[in-house]
Image (cartoon, rainbow, N blue to C red):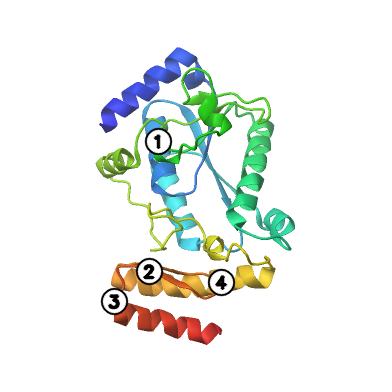
C-alpha cells in the first residue's frame, strides 16, 4: 500500500505540476503529518516541514520530530507561537484549539509566502473530513484546493486514505512517533498538546494554561509507565482514562491532589 501511495502521489504531482514547486508541510510530529512528509519526500517533491510550538508544547514530541526530519534529509522550520496564542486566547472561552488553529494557519500562510513556498501541505486523512468545510467542497480532486481567502493552494496527500490505512502505511514505513499517552478528546487517538484539556466553559488564563501543562505532563509519566491513555481536564480536574485500573487511578489522583 505504501509503494502504491508514493507512486500515486508522484503521478498526481506530475499531472498537476506541483511536484516542481516548493511545498511546505505543517508538521506536528504525529503519525499523519509524519507519513505525509515521508510520502512526499519519497515521491520526489521539494518539501520542507514547518512546526509550530509554544511554551506549553510537549518537548519530547518536538525533539522526536526534529530527529525524524533529519533522518529524511528534510529542511525543518520551527516557529514559536507563544505570544500569539496568549493574545488570542487569554480572556476567552475554549476550546483553545479553535484559537490556536487560526493562529497556525495564518502564520503558516505568511511564512510560506515570505519564504518562497508555493504550496501548503497538511496531513489530513479521510477521517478528518468535515461536511461543509471549504477544503472538502473544492471542485475536482480535493487533494489540492485553492481558496482565495487562504491565498495559497492547500495540498492534502492523505485525504483519500482512512485512518486505519494511514496506520498501516506508517507501520510499513516504520514511523513510530513519540507518544505522550494522552487520552485525546475523541475516541480516535489524537494527541496534540495539554492545552486541549482546559474545560471548554472555562475562561482561559495563563495560570490555567500553565496548570494544564504541569498536571498533564506529570500524568503522562504514569500513563507511559502503565501503557494506558490518561489526561486530566482543568480546572474541573476530571480524570479521563482508557483501560485504567485502580492502581493507575490512585497514582493519577495523587497528582491531582497535589494541585488542588
Q: Which residue is mark 1?
A: 126
Crowd class of label 3 (few under 14; some 14 to 19; many from 20; radius 10 Å) = few
Point out the tag, 4 or 1, that comes first from the N-terminus. 1
Crowd class of label 2 (few under 14; some 14 to 19; many from 20; radius 10 Å) = many
Q: Which residue is mark 2?
A: 241
Residue at point 49%, 55% (across, down): 192
Question: What is the C-alpha distance between the residues marked 4 and 1?
Answer: 31 Å
Count numbered badges in the picture. Answer: 4
Residue 245 numbered mark, or none: 3
Residue at point 37%, 75% (across, down): 222
- Is 50 displayed left or right of 244 in the figure? right
**Label 3: which secondary element:** loop
Point out the tag, 1 or 3, that comes first from the N-terminus. 1
What is the x, y in percent for residue 2? 28, 32
Question: What is the C-alpha distance between the residues marked 1 and 3?
Answer: 33 Å
Question: What is the C-alpha distance between the residues marked 3 and 2?
Answer: 9 Å
Kindly check if marks 1 and 3 are in contact, taking CB atoms under 8 A apart as contact: no
Residue 234 numbered mark, or none: 4
Amino acid at each position: 500500500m505504501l509503494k502504491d501511495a508514493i507512486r500515486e502521489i508522484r503521478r498526481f504531482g506530475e499531472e498537476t505540476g506541483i511536484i516542481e514547486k516548493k511545498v511546505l508541510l505543517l508538521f506536528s510530529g504525529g503519525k499523519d503529518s509524519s507519513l505525509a512528509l515521508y510520502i512526499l519526500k519519497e515521491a520526489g517533491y521539494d518539501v520542507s516541514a514547518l512546526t509550530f510550538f509554544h511554551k506549553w508544547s510537549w518537548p519530547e514530541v518536538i525533539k522526536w520530530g526534529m530527529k525524524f526530519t533529519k533522518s529524511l534529509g528534510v529542511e525543518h522550520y520551527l516557529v514559536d507561537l507563544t505570544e500569539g496564542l496568549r493574545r488570542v486566547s487569554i480572556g476567552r472561552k475554549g476550546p483553545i484549539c479553535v484559537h490556536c488553529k487560526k493562529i497556525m494557519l495564518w502564520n503558516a500562510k505568511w511564512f510560506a509566502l515570505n519564504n518562497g513556498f508555493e504550496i501548503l501541505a497538511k496531513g489530513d486523512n479521510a477521517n478528518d473530513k468535515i461536511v461543509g468545510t471549504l477544503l472538502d467542497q473544492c471542485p475536482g480532486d480535493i487533494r489540492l484546493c485553492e481558496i482565495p481567502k487562504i491565498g495559497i493552494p492547500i495540498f492534502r496527500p492523505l485525504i483519500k486514505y482512512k485512518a486505519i490505512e494511514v496506520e498501516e502505511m506508517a507501520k510499513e514505513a516504520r514511523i513510530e512517533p513519540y507518544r505522550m499517552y494522552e487520552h485525546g478528546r475523541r475516541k480516535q487517538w489524537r494527541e496534540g498538546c495539554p492545552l486541549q484539556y482546559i474545560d471548554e466553559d472555562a475562561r482561559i488564563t495563563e495560570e490555567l494554561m500553565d496548570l494544564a501543562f504541569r498536571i498533564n505532563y506529570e500524568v503522562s509519566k504514569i500513563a507511559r509507565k502503565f501503557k494506558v491513555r490518561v489526561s486530566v481536564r482543568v480546572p474541573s480536574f476530571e480524570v479521563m482514562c482508557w483501560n485504567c485500573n485502580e492502581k493507575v487511578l490512585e497514582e493519577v489522583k495523587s497528582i491531582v491532589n497535589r494541585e488542588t
